Image (tube, rainbow, N blue to C red):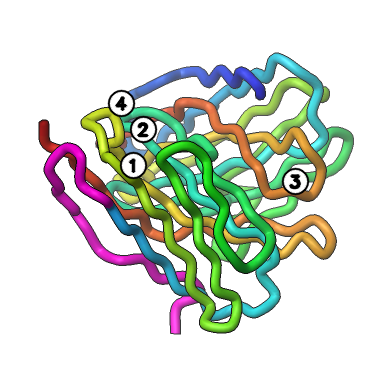
Amino acid sequence: SAVISQKPSRDICQRGTSLTIQCQVDSQVTMMFWYRQQPGQSLTLIATANQGSEATYESGFVIDKFPISRPNLTFSTLTVSNMSPEDSSIYLCSVELYSRTGELFFGEGSRLTVL
Amino acid sequence: QKEVEQDPGPLSVPEGAIVSLNCTYSNSAFQYFMWYRQYSRKGPELLMYTYSSGNKEDGRFTAQVDKSSKYISLFIRDSQPSDSATYLCAFSMKTSYDKVIFGPGTSLSVIP
């Protein structure tokens, strides 16, 4: 398994500001994923982050709004830019340890509230 | 038609009951079928994983896949209060790397 640490665990932000969420993994992984879970809803993939290349974004998500960094095999950041109340959500970092199995390990999430 | 549909909750059962959780899917290219469990204020954790039709058992949990009907189920025997969580079905194609698609989740409460 993997231990995934996310910071911050929660935050309250003002409209128009940006917040960067950090994800640290205790082992080297190729694929890291960022999901959003809105209140009472399931997980939606925002983007896939591979080390050494640009993140791949899912439909409906753009780099200007959700820039991602992946500087090495154990760390990634997701920034939520120019936030609005609609961005209030839980943001989850996940990794895939075993290639092409779909078995994901998740962090505990970062609960973001935008006022 | 949605790609994945899951029985709506919330579901409340007495301790010791048998629980059945169900999902249907529309994409016949899905090859991997998973159930994740998510406790309140925690990230999801993989509970069951299978890649073929039929049943897979792990303790009190049984995952059932029917590819012909595009239907998967999770059965929980002798349910315990510690089983109270949201259960998410999940699917993946994995012919090459592909994303995992999650169902909306069913919230389960097991009452002592």
The relative height of residue B54 versus residue A12 in the rendered view (above or below) is below
The mark that comes first in sequence, 4 or 2, is 4
Q: Is residue A23 magenta?
A: no
**Which residues, given as a range, are shown in magenta?**
B1-18
Instruction: From the top left corner, tell me how far across and down residue A76 is, in percent.
Output: 69, 27
Q: Are marks 1 and 3 in contact (CB under 8 Å)?
A: no
**Which residue is nearer to you in this view: A50 or B95?**
B95
Report which residue position mark 2 lands on.
A112
Report which residue position mark 1 lands on.
A88
Point 36% across, 41% down: residue? A89
Point 29% across, 47% down: residue? A39
Report which residue position mark 4 lands on.
A12
Report which residue position mark 3 lands on.
A55
**Prevailing secondary structure class for the magenta stretch in the rendered image:** loop
Q: Name the kind of residue labelled 2 in the image.
A: Leu
Q: Is residue A45 left or right of residue A63?
A: left
